[in-house]
Image (cartoon, rainbow, N blue to C red):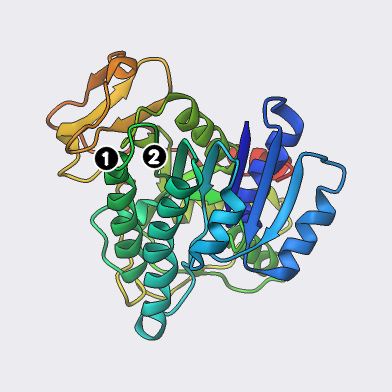
C-alpha cells in the first residue's frame, strides 16, 4: 500500500509514520507532505532508517504539486490544516488552506488515480461557532459528496476530539507552570472536552481505510471530562510536593469557544450507526452513493441519542485521565 499524508510533519503525521514503521508491513511507500521546510528536514532525519519513507515539500493550496506527490499512491490521508490563527484577521487564510486546500486534495486524488481519501476533521466542525469550525465543516461536506465523482474513488471523514500529547497541548504548559509554582489558567471551570491519545487517532484512521464504503464520517467512542479534571490529573503526576495553585479563570474566549463540544450534530443523529464490531460510530452520507453491506452490523442510534462532552458514553475520572496522560506520553509519538 502506498500512502501520502498531507500535513505529515504535524503531531498526527509523525504518530502515523511511527506506527507504520513499527507495525505495518503492508505500507510499501509513505510520503509526508508539508510546507514547512524545517519540519520536513527534521522528520526526514527522524525516520532516516525507515526506507519506505520520504518527506516532500508542498502546500495543499498548490494542486499541481499535490498531483505530483499523489501520483502512484493508493491512499491519501489529508491532515493539513490551519487552526491556531486569529480568525478576525486571518480568516481568509483558514479558508484557503482548510476549505480550498481540501477541494484541491480531492481534485488531485481524482486526477492521480488515488483510490481512497481519509480527511481528518474535528469536533469543532459540529454545529460550528467559529471560523475554524466552519472551514472544517465545509471541507467535511465536500469530502462526503466527492464520492459521486468517480465510482472507483472513495472518500470519508474521521472526526474526533482533543488529542493528549499533540503539539501545542495544554499539558506541557500546565506542567511547566505547576513545577515553577506559577498559576495556571482555565477559561471556565464548567468546560468539558473529549480526550484521546494520538495512537487512538491513528487506529481510527486505519479503521476508516479498511472499512470505508464512501461518504461516511467515522467517530470514535471516547471518554470526556471537565478540563479542570485534566488539570487535576496533570498535577497528580507531578507528585505531592508540588502544590497546585488555584487557577486563574479567564472566561470563555471570544470568537466562538464552546462550553461543551459535540461529536455528532442534531441533524446527523438519524443517520448514525453504532457499530457492533468496532468501537466507532458511523454517520452515513445524506445521499449514499455506496452499498451499506459492511455496515449492516451497525445499530441505528436511538432518537434521543446525544454525543456531547458533558453527556458522553463515558465520563473519565481523574484517575482515568491520569492513566490516559501516562499512556499518551509512553506512546513515543
Give the residue furthest to the bottom: 89
Is 131 on the left-hand or right-hand side of 194? left
Q: Quadrant of residue 174?
A: bottom right
> In x, y percent, where is residue 40?
73, 62
Secondary element under disc 1, as helix, strand or loop, is helix
In three-dimensional space, the C-alpha distance between marks 2 and 1, rounded to whole angstroms, equals 10 Å
Q: Which residue is mark 2?
A: 155
Does any portion of residue 308 appear in the rendered image? no
Q: Quadrant of residue 99?
A: bottom left
> In x, y percent, where is residue 192?
37, 52
Quadrant assignment for the N terminus: top right
Marks 2,1: beta carbons within 8 A: no
Residue lying at 31% horizontally and 37% vertically, measured from the top left:
215
- How many marks the image carries: the answer is 2
Dot 1, how many residues are within 10 Å of its Cα: few (below 14), some (14-19), or many (20+)?
some
> In x, y percent, where is residue 36?
66, 69
Tell which circle, 2 or 1, labels the residue nearer the N-terminal end: 1
Give the residue furthest to the left: 303
Q: Name above or below for residue 56 compared with residue 206.
A: below
Secondary element under disc 2, as helix, strand or loop, is strand
Between residues 180 and 20, which one lies in front from this camera angle? 20
Between residues 193 and 32, which one lies in front from this camera angle? 32
Residue lying at 63% horizontally and 62% vertically, measured from the top left:
34
Q: Quadrant of residue 22?
A: top right
Is 135 on the left-hand or right-hand side of 270? right
Rendered image: mark on residue 280: none
Rendered image: mark on residue 148: 1
Q: Name above or below for residue 43 compared with residue 317.
A: below
Q: Name above or below for residue 230 compared with residue 185.
A: above
> In x, y percent, where is residue 264?
27, 42
Amino acid at each position: 500500500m502506498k500512502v501520502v499524508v498531507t500535513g505529515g510533519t504535524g503531531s498526527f503525521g509523525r504518530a502515523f509514520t511511527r506506527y507504520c514503521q513499527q507495525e505495518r508491513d503492508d505500507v510499501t511507500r509513505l510520503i509526508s507532505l508539508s510546507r514547512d521546510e524545517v519540519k520536513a528536514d527534521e522528520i526526514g532525519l527522524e525516520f532516516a532508517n525507515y526506507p519506505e519513507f520520504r518527506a516532500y515539500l508542498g502546500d495543499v493550496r498548490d494542486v499541481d504539486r499535490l498531483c505530483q506527490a499523489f501520483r502512484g499512491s493508493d491512499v491519501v490521508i489529508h491532515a493539513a490544516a490551519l487552526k491556531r490563527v486569529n480568525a478576525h484577521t486571518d480568516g481568509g487564510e483558514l479558508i484557503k488552506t482548510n476549505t480550498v486546500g481540501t477541494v484541491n486534495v480531492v481534485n488531485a486524488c481524482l486526477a492521480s488515480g488515488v483510490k481512497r481519501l481519509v480527511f481528518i476533521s474535528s469536533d469543532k466542525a459540529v454545529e460550528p461557532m467559529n471560523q475554524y469550525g466552519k472551514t472544517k465543516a465545509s471541507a467535511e461536506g465536500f469530502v462526503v459528496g466527492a464520492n459521486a465523482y468517480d465510482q472507483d474513488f472513495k472518500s470519508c471523514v474521521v472526526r474526533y476530539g482533543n488529542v493528549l500529547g499533540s503539539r501545542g497541548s495544554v499539558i506541557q504548559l500546565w506542567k511547566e507552570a505547576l513545577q515553577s509554582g506559577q498559576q495556571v489558567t482555565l477559561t471556565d471551570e464548567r468546560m468539558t472536552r473529549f480526550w484521546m491519545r494520538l495512537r487512538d487517532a491513528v487506529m481510527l484512521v486505519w479503521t476508516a481505510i479498511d472499512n470505508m464504503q464512501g461518504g461516511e464520517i467515522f467517530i470514535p467512542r471516547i471518554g470526556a471530562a471537565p478540563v479542570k479534571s485534566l488539570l487535576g490529573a496533570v498535577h497528580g503526576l507531578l507528585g505531592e510536593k508540588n502544590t497546585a495553585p488555584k487557577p486563574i479563570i479567564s472566561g470563555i474566549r471570544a470568537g466562538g469557544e464552546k462550553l461543551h463540544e459535540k461529536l455528532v450534530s442534531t441533524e446527523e443523529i438519524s443517520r448514525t450507526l453504532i457499530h457492533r464490531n468496532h468501537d466507532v460510530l458511523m454517520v452515513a452520507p445524506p445521499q449514499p452513493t455506496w452499498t451499506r453491506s459492511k455496515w449492516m452490523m451497525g445499530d441505528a442510534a436511538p432518537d434521543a441519542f446525544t454525543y456531547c462532552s458533558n453527556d458522553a458514553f463515558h465520563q473519565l475520572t481523574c484517575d482515568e485521565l491520569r492513566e490516559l496522560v501516562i499512556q499518551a506520553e509512553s506512546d513515543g509519538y
